[in-house]
Image (cartoon, rainbow, N blue to C red):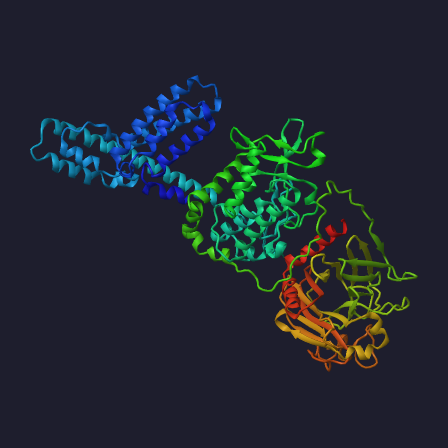
Amino acid sequence: RRGLIDLPDQKICGSQLLGGIGDTIAVLADVAGAKAPKQLANFRKYLASLPDPDKKMLKPLRRRLDELAKASIDLARAFDTNNDRDALWWVKTLVHQCSDALEEITFFCPWITLTHPSARLSEFLETMEIPTLRELITAKKKLINVIENMVSINATAEEIAWFADFRRMIKEGSVRAAERIAAIDRLAAQANDFADMDYSFLYDKGSHLLTIGYNTTERRRDASYYDLLASEARFCSFIGIAQGQLPQENWFALGRLLTNPRRYPVLLSWDGSMFEYLMPLLVMPNYESTLLDQTYTAAVRRQIDYGKSRGVPWGISESGYSTIDVHQNYQYRAFGVPGLGLKRGLSDDLVVAPYASALALMVAPEEACLNLQRLAREGMEGAYGFYEAIDYTSSRLPRGKSSVVVKSFMAHHQGMSLLALSHLLLDCSMQKRFASEPMFQSTILLLQERIPRAVAFYRQIAEDTTMRRATPAREFPARIFKTPHTPIPKVQLLSNGRYHVMITNAGGGYSRFQELGITRWREDSTRDNWGTFCYIRDITNGEFWSTAYQPTLKQPERYEAIFSDARVEFRRRDHEIDTHTQIAVSPEDDIELRRVRITNRSRKPRELDITSYAEIVLAAPAADALHPAFANLFVQTEIIRERQTILCTRRPRSKDDPSHWMFHLMALHGTPNKEVSYETDRLKFIGRGNTLADPQAMRWSENISETLSNTQGSVLDPIAAIRCRVLLDAGASVTIDIVSGISETRDQALGLAEKYHDQRLADRVFDLAWTHSQV
């Protein structure tokens, strides 16, 4: 749209016209090679000899174009004896290019073809500069008046007749310019209308994300979302926000998972494709030293490194590949680079798409040019540019072949390549147009997000690049227990290789980090009352229970413990309140997520207190079992109210002791927090002579405070407990995320706590955990 708006104020034959003709000649010379006639060299010399003033003045330029048009026709005749089809095609293109330019300048300035009747008129018209479309309209009267004043003094009959023709023709040119501007305005308005989309049917207000699509048959949104900043969808989000159709929350809801291949922070995408990272850059401006700028550079570096490691040209993106359907059409899907994408199995395929290298021209032009030249040497050039892709995947290769060229051309990939070339050769013209749009200028700060200084990087397991096809994943049936009263506890283990959680069908268990115990646990199958728990209390009548059977031991109306791949679930109903608890360990961070969804099945509002509880150890389980009281003396606690988090650390007993920081947070989603309180002293929570089945903190009376004591520091018996209060209308639900984790430093622990306050990032834990379990 902005390019169309600017057209009326650009010269009708710009300075790039002769340069374009020169480019066509250069291509023709390359194609013709040694068979090129001598007229081709003469044509190139003549074009290079044109003086600069002739390229700016209307009359001399028209004269040069007329000469070039005639010379191109002579050149085409010289090529008639050449049997090279490509050379003939390019020489015909040259003829059309020269004749079209001549016709265009004559169409808007028809008076230029008039023979000058006198020297004074000739001198004036020879120095007239090339006009714009708007100047042809606005300067019409001025130009007529100037010529009229010249011929009014001692005018000859020839000058008077010439002036009559000139007046008529300049009016014709003005009308044609006005018609062209009107057509341009209509196209600009049409482009504006096309850009005015309704996003409401795709936008989910709860998650602040756009869904992947809309199922018209079922009249519902798809279940998946565009939830990563490193995605082509950020372009759509930016436009929607600039237009006022999407709130800014949509931009900040996009995930910002970072990884660091080669120690360069880079945002993770889903497929790890060049398209996800660089497609928006075709039109959106880039700003140095920002998160996106660093991501562009690091993503291209990773693509280059991966190509070198596999011994092939680099540049992987979604594209066609060497598989055809019954209609002989190549199949198409996304490919990417391991280490950049969250998707598993990226190393199973190896398909290189030249348009991915073309996109990289905007980030690493020299490396991209060399890679494109390498692709050309490997036979990737066709009649319409580079072929779609080259497939190196061994399972799709014919016997004796190391690669297969996917010989097709996709218009949108060729179009992206042309835009990338214009970015490099025309000084970011599309980006400048985009940034000059008033609607976008108020939103452009979104693209200037800085690189975070302290962040927990996503840890990816390196994929074996020699692996071609993964074996089908084994499916383990879910184990479902309808009762917590089994003869011996049934156990599920969750782990990411470093952080381990054990949970029984009654809700007991432990959390450990490598050899370090995080929460206290004793092996006692008769009690099973150790672990991380969650209490629920009804404020109206003081009744309380837990989300699993432990630790309150209260029999629910309905109970279910479900052990499945990478997840543990508990479902129960008490006093017309349904609770659904899901527990998983993140494969990217050393944390466990316990998500509790509470639904009010009664017909009246219910006010509830939600209280978490865990006894903190931060020591080897054996050492804690031998001297628990002594071990407790070195644990310190700290309440971080602004993040609804409790930090715990163990004071080192020597300089060689490793440092660990444990955090425990509670995040409420779907309803505002009414009150949040904290407790880190076990005695104040349980009370003297009480147990976890009936702790003092859960008893309700007018003489006992409804909030926890907010004790912190060096306590004798450390715990982590957080309480929040929610008000649930009839039929309403609320989601509470209880997250515990560990890191080496305080800043890292706070970074993780802040990260998992974001529900979208917490949502990913379950998906990533399941994916991790299939490997």
Q: Residue at x 81, y 79 (%)?
A: 629
Pick the front one: 537 or 723: 723
| Relative side of 273 to 615, left or right | left
- For this rendering, which residue is in front, 501 or 337? 337
Residue 157: percent from the left, percent from the top?
10, 27
- Is residue 539 visible in this depiction of the protein? no
Q: Considering only vertical position in the picture, is 593 above or below 405?
A: below
> Which residue ends up furthest to the left in the rendered image?
154
Residue 332 percent location from the top left of the image: 63, 36
Quadrant of residue 110 within the rendered picture: top left
Residue sitting at 43 percent across and 54 percent down?
Answer: 441
Whether residue 543 appears in this view of the structure is: yes
> Horizontal placement of 66 versus 76: left or right?
left
Between 373 and 700, the one lying in front of the other is 373
Residue 290 x, y percent position in the rendering:
52, 57
491 left or right of 386?
right
Q: Residue at x 29, y 30 (%)?
A: 64
